Image (cartoon, rainbow, N blue to C red):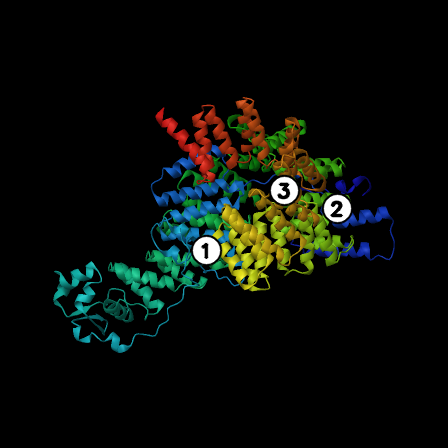
Amino acid sequence: MRGLKLIDRFKSAQVHAFNPTDTSGGKTPRGGTVRAKLEAQIIKSFVSNSKPNKAHNSVSVAETLLPYGLPATDLLEPRLEPHLKPVDLIGSLAELYRRIEGCPSPSKKSLLLVEQYSLMRGLADPKLLRRCLRAARLQAEDVHSKVVLSAWLRFERREDELVGVSAMDCGGHVLECPKAALVNGYDPNSTFKDCHCCCGPFEVINKSMLEENECLSFEKENDVSFYIGEEEIKCVRYRMATLSTPFKAMLYGSFKESKKGNIDFSQNGISVEGMRAVEVYSRTKRLDCFSPKILVELLSFSNRFCCDEMKAACDAHLASLVVTIDDALILIEYGLEETANILLASCLQVLLRRLPNSLCRPKVMKFLCCSKTRGRFSILGSASFLLYCFLSQVAMGESMVSKMTVKLLKRLGECATENWQKALASHQLGCVLLERQEYNTAQRSFEAAVEAGHVYSMAGIARAKNKLGQQYSAYKLMCYVISEYKPAGWMHEERSLYNIGKEKDLDLSTATKMDPTLLFPYKYRAVAKMEEKQIRAAILEIDKIIGFKLSPDCLELRAWLFIALEDYGNAIRDIRVILTLEPNYMMFGEKVRGDYLIEVLSRLVQKWSQADCWMCLYEKWSSVDDVGSLAIIHQMLESDPANSVLQFRQSLLLLRLNCQKAAMRSLRLARNHSSSEHERLVYEGWILYDTGNREEALSRAEKSISIQRSFEAFFLKAYVLADTSLNPESSSSVIQLLEEALRCPSDGLRKGQALNNLGSIYVDCGNLDQAAGCYKNALDIKHTRAHQGLARVYHLRNQRKAAYDEMTQLIEKAQSKASAYEKRSEYCDDREVAKQDLDTATELDPLRTYPYRYRAAVSMDDQKENEAVEELTKALNFRPDLQMLHLRAAFYDSMGNTTSALRDCQAALCLDPNHTDTLDLYNRAHNSVIQN
């Protein structure tokens, strides 16, 4: 790697950061040819009889590991976000809250809550998004909306990945129960109800045919006969008349049939068997003795002759027969043709609750993507938009470039009626078409989104123009956006693509200042340093974003840089973390599987035994190196992939790193691989807790304890109780549970956490000596985070210097230091020193909100009101946070700016409608406006 000549040697034309220009005739190789090439080079490099010199071998290894070259700055570009991104998110949330609160119709409110879900997609908070969907499902009135939203909720939980769980299982949640979804009407209390239906798949009712004497038991009453051809069907006149008003008019009205005993019914489109079934139903009101074919015929007959009761019965009974996808595909046609709402909903439910697998069925896709189907789905009303919104989101998650995704998004656009719906459909279609390199049509889609009011889609127009060779036009468009609208980080980031030299650097610097969470500026600066042969500086640059926002593409870039430095150990670490986040991740511009690259790199580093891994894991855990810990666990799982304990540890680390989606996947794997019933119950309990079902989580913990006392079961129960409410009585219970947990076998990693939690409870109860003992015991087993708890104890004892020193020790030991600097600032006697610590915390992790709130409060104390508001605004521009919104609203209220205070309260309540302090402030401000 002398002089890093490889940078020039392996430059390649790329569209995205790591996407070389396709030279394979439109087909991207998925590892076969590349794997063979790498294997041949590895064999040549490592099995050669000759012994090349170090420099030559270095270049050979690097050539092997960098077959597609390092990324180039002129080919990097950020990803367009495929969701709604308003210029003023806080204003949009506030306005939406007002509309939700003022909406009297549950069904309309349900749609508003889906709009809220779409607005909040950019916040990437699964719990917040799930709450929006739950609220939308609660407000839904019609069965079609209920079916879509309950399936959507279930999809977000990914329960299909749990071994032994059927697609149509209820799971105990009314809002997700398949049977509850098929009941029309609004139930405001359903969110508080547990479902006790214990329903598995809908069972096909398969009772024996009615005994013939039962069918003929009323033979003496027969006083009218219907003829179909030569066949006679004897009926009871008054019973047939009760089927519908038309039959009553025919049999008892002024029609000639009312005087006849024999009626020719041959021209009414019903078979002999169908008419006999009508006669049986007229007397017994039962349908369980008929085949689906006859039931479909009865359904059609009911429509023609307005037999509402029989139609409803047929509709419900046919719905109960839909079990498989094949059943659904057959019966959904009849549901549409005969406007059988329950049948149609049941068929859709079977298809939706098997997503994404059902999308792989050609017949399913042909049906859903067909433009004629979309027209026939007008029977669904507003639920048709919900349906295609859900389907297109799933499709985009599976593939952004498939024809299926394009077709579903086109159907979504056809269903859109409101501006936000049109904007969402058009913008998402534009993103997909841009990925498919269909730039002209992508531009038209983005223009349609802009016309519907979505300013962010102008970035899509600019991107498409640039791809079509109109770089200056793209630059002018972004200049217009920056001048006409409230400036945002993404605007400068986008303009930087069409800028050069110092102006480009200035745009990127401004983008980072406005929104430090944007990935692209860090990646660009890192690659620019790499091109200047400053690889270690490039790594430091990309470390800035990885330090607080774990992203596969940033980790991949850092892995490339480590390979260029021949630091294969750290490169392997980063690739392992990537595969923990996305198990199927493809490296080198989607050319090489990550796991194969690990296999190649592993030949260049020392091999570790499982015991070595455990020792290293303790070391990483102790040094608060969560990324390193993830890599070690991934390595351990390679040799023991079914180890549920390791998968559970993995999920804890991922949650700490705010990677909730990956954490839930690890939890599901832990549950699936659990070796005992009591262990499985614990992991199910954590899944339930993390999805907001605390009572059920508590129930799982108690059931696990009843089977076998274990550390994890007691710890789960204590954790859930502590999070629910901490009064003196519950605190005592939590302490007892944690002490029970510590008596059970476990390893030092978990016992350290339990001791740390126990210390926190003791502090809350005022038992400082016991708390200090817990923290010291935790430190004895190298649970480094206990320094923070011990510092808190010293602070409460008015030993501020000892507290400060304790946090200094944590800073010295920890790899992740932002929270330690933040906490140490509380123990500084000097305000300037505290501010320095908080500034360092913000620099390391700009997502932490306390430093902004502290600096704002200090400015407010100094009567610098505008500076206080500006400090909070700076953070709120890229991270709408409940606490910061509440604090800024309070500042505005004290400044007499009631309008701004109301807006911030409304935005905060959109994030959490039950936040007591904000509700109080909102009501006071609202009453003040009314009085004035």
From the viewer's perspective, tell me whether residue 219 is left or right of residue 58: left
Give the number of marks. 3
Residue ID at (43%, 36%): 919
Sequence-earlier tag: 1 or 2: 1
Reply above or below: 290 against 781: below
Kind of residue indicated by mark 1: Leu
Separation of residues labelled 3 and 1 (CA atoms):
47 Å
Q: From this viewpoint, is residue 217 visible?
A: yes
- Depth check, mark 3 against mark 1: the one in front is 3
From the viewer's perspective, tell me whether residue 325 is left or right of residue 207: right
Q: Quadrant of the N terminus?
A: top right
**Residue 830 image offset from top left, x and y in percent:** 65, 27
Q: Residues within 10 Å of mark 2 (few under 14, many from 20)?
A: many
List the residue tagged with mark 2.
563
**Residue 376 image offset from top left, x and y in percent:** 37, 52
Label 2 element class:
helix
Sequence-earlier tag: 3 or 1: 1
Label annotation for residue 352: 1
